[in-house]
Amino acid sequence: MAPSIITGLLLPLLAATSSLAFDTTTRCTTSTFSSLSGVEISTVETLKGSSILRLPDLVPSCGGPDKNITVSADICRLVANVRTSNSSSIRIEAWLPDNWNSRLLATGTGGTGGCVDYSRLQSGAQLGFAAFGTNAGHDGSSGHDFFLNQPEVINDFGHRAIHVEAAVGKKITALFYGREVSKSYYDGCSTGGRQALQEAAMYQDDFDGILAGAPGVDWLKIVASKAILARRIGWPDLNSSAYVRPEQWQAIVAKQIELFDELDGEKDGIIDAPQNIRFDPALLACGTGALGQDLCLHPDQVQSVEEAYQPLTNGDGEIIYPPFIIGASTGVFSNNQKDGKPILNYSLVRDFWRGAVYNNSDWNENNFTLSDLDYALSINPGGVNSNSRDLSRFHQRGGKVLAYHGLVDTTVTPLLSMEFYKGVQAAVGLSLEEMQSFYRLFLVPGMDHCSAGPGAWNIGQVYPLDSKRLDAANHALLALVDWVEGGKAPDFLTGAKYQNDSVSQPILAERRHCPYPSQSRWDGRENRRDVRGWVCGYA
Ligand SMILES: *[C@@H]1O[C@H](CO)[C@@H](O)[C@H](O)[C@H]1NC(C)=O
Ligand SMILES: *[C@@H]1O[C@H](CO)[C@@H](O)[C@H](O)[C@H]1NC(C)=O
Ligand SMILES: *[C@@H]1O[C@H](CO)[C@@H](O)[C@H](O)[C@H]1NC(C)=O
Ligand SMILES: *[C@@H]1O[C@H](CO)[C@@H](O)[C@H](O)[C@H]1NC(C)=O
Ligand SMILES: *[C@@H]1O[C@H](CO)[C@@H](O)[C@H](O)[C@H]1NC(C)=O
Ligand SMILES: *[C@@H]1O[C@H](CO)[C@@H](O)[C@H](O)[C@H]1NC(C)=O
Ligand SMILES: *[C@@H]1O[C@H](CO)[C@@H](O)[C@H](O)[C@H]1NC(C)=O
């Protein structure tokens, strides 16, 4: 495997690494790790870059049962169970590259946890990191049986797994390479982004740099919001005059894009700043001609759509969760029937409330109200609703947070990231300038949840990587490394849109993404698909 192409940045460290005085193959044995306590090793194997790793035992919700993935570098692969209490353990998986850059990269999970993030292991090992993944204490990203009557399994998912992964990961890395890691990083999206900011708040010494995608802070509210919004649109009574059907929602969102797309200067299917738009659903009422007879909104439906875009408020009318974003697909709450019966396709609310909140397999979300959310918040299973804005200890020790969030995120409203950013600023008591010196948030127009969408969204967060874009301007993790180790804060990130979203195809557009609250603006001269046409600034 060729050394990583991040030359300017990593040269000194790579030089040190190339003089490693041992043969990684002979080190890649169980005995190297025998001093670890509470760790039960199941696999230690040497794998060649470009070979295929078979994963025959993956559960279906993690992509199994028989998944094959490409090994991205010459590595030593270790799989182990780490005891976390006397009724729980987490599985961790390490990819330890021969060509080590002296750093550690830990990764998180998505949804309701339970799946090793192989894509980030592949990227991390290719870039030279000792890369770690975890199942966060249970197997599977859907279902609830693993949580029933298992408070310690819930604790692993809620707050403990990543902390243990970091601690054990550092030991494994030191045993294998014969010296301590130089710097430790974390990379995760969605639930992985929740785990990211929770680490910064609770375990400030675990990582030097944290990459947080679409962070699911206030996790219980995010999950609950799907059921609450569904009920605002007449569900589960599919015959009610207020009920807005799935196909109507598709038409509503398509119409939003048609109406507001051009406000930013180009009709490209992307509303650049949907957070600034006030959408009046009366525009789509029957009689206006905006939508056909079968899709237009009757008066009660107009009211439903209006309510669907309102924030969640508590009994005192205070906002507790910001609104769904205009222009984003509403499937998480509007895909809510199957064979004529009401059921949310978004299964997380059912899974988590059954398994971790009510410990009751018969519960369902059809009558979900704010009191179900309030109850969950009051018991906060496993500490999962990590919502502390107080990152002062992480700030004081010099840690850096690089966050990103798509502006058409269908699962976690990007408004949450903006609100959280301001919340941290207030809690830590920093000026905007001080804030920017430790925490930067990049909003990505036209990006959905974690990746995908019509925008120039690729900032290196998915595998495979584009070998031509492995530098701090184009790759979020490398920008973070440059910030932590070189003191160079990222002034922008350049995102790419590939044909078919495939890095082996041509780039159709590149665009500069800017640290919130600044915004990328077209200079009005260059081609809008050329990164040089974009500057960061304020309205
Ligand atoms: C994985 O590879 C094995 C061995 O080549 C093959 O038998 C199996 O069908 C593959 N699995 C999938 C899901 O492609
Ligand atoms: C489990 O751990 C707790 C606290 O560490 C201890 O008090 C208890 O005896 C243990 N239970 C078993 C069955 O080992
Ligand atoms: C969960 O439910 C089971 C079966 O109803 C019960 O035995 C158990 O005590 C409950 N556990 C908790 C933590 O409530
Ligand atoms: C809804 O309407 C359909 C057809 O009009 C009917 O078959 C069904 O029983 C109704 N459902 C309810 C819950 O009223
Ligand atoms: C239902 O959810 C699954 C899993 O998240 C997703 O792949 C699928 O596209 C969804 N279907 C609909 C109709 O929303
Ligand atoms: C929801 O509430 C209604 C009215 O109280 C009740 O008839 C229905 O059985 C409940 N549905 C579920 C799934 O609990
Ligand atoms: C893009 O992907 C689609 C579906 O996978 C495929 O049919 C099409 O040929 C691809 N286009 C190109 C240019 O590769």
Image: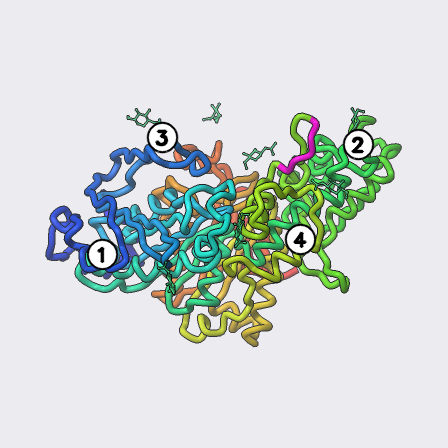
Residues at marks 1 and 4, CA–CA distance in whole angstroms: 53 Å
In this view of the protein, which residue sits in the foreground, 277 or 158? 158
Question: Any mark on residue 239, and which?
Answer: 2
Marks 2, 4: nearer the viewer: 4
CA gap, disc 3 and disc 1: 36 Å
* Mark 3 vs mark 4: in front: 4
Seen at 28% across and 49% down, the residue is 80
Marks 3 and 4, the one that precedes in the sequence:
3
Q: Amino acid at mark 3?
A: Asp
Q: Which residue is mark 3?
A: 66
Residue 503 place in picture, x, y as percent? 41, 37
Foreground: disc 2 or disc 1: 2
Q: Are marks 1 and 4 in contact (CB under 8 Å)?
A: no
Residue indicated by mark 1: 14
Q: Amino acid at mark 2?
A: Asn
- Was residue 151 drawn as part of the magenta stretch in this picture? no
Q: Circle 1: is it few (<14), some (14-19), or many (20+) Cα within 10 Å?
A: some
Across and down, in percent, residue 293 comes to: 83, 26
**Which amino acid, by three-letter code, is at mark 1?**
Leu
Tell me which residue sits at (46%, 45%) in the image: 146
* Residue that label 4 marks: 372
Specify whether tag 4 is near ligand 6 (CB below 8 Å). no
Location of residue 69 with respect to 216 vertically, above or below: above
Residue range (magenta): 340-344
| Ligand 4 contact, mark 2 (Cβ < 8 Å) | yes
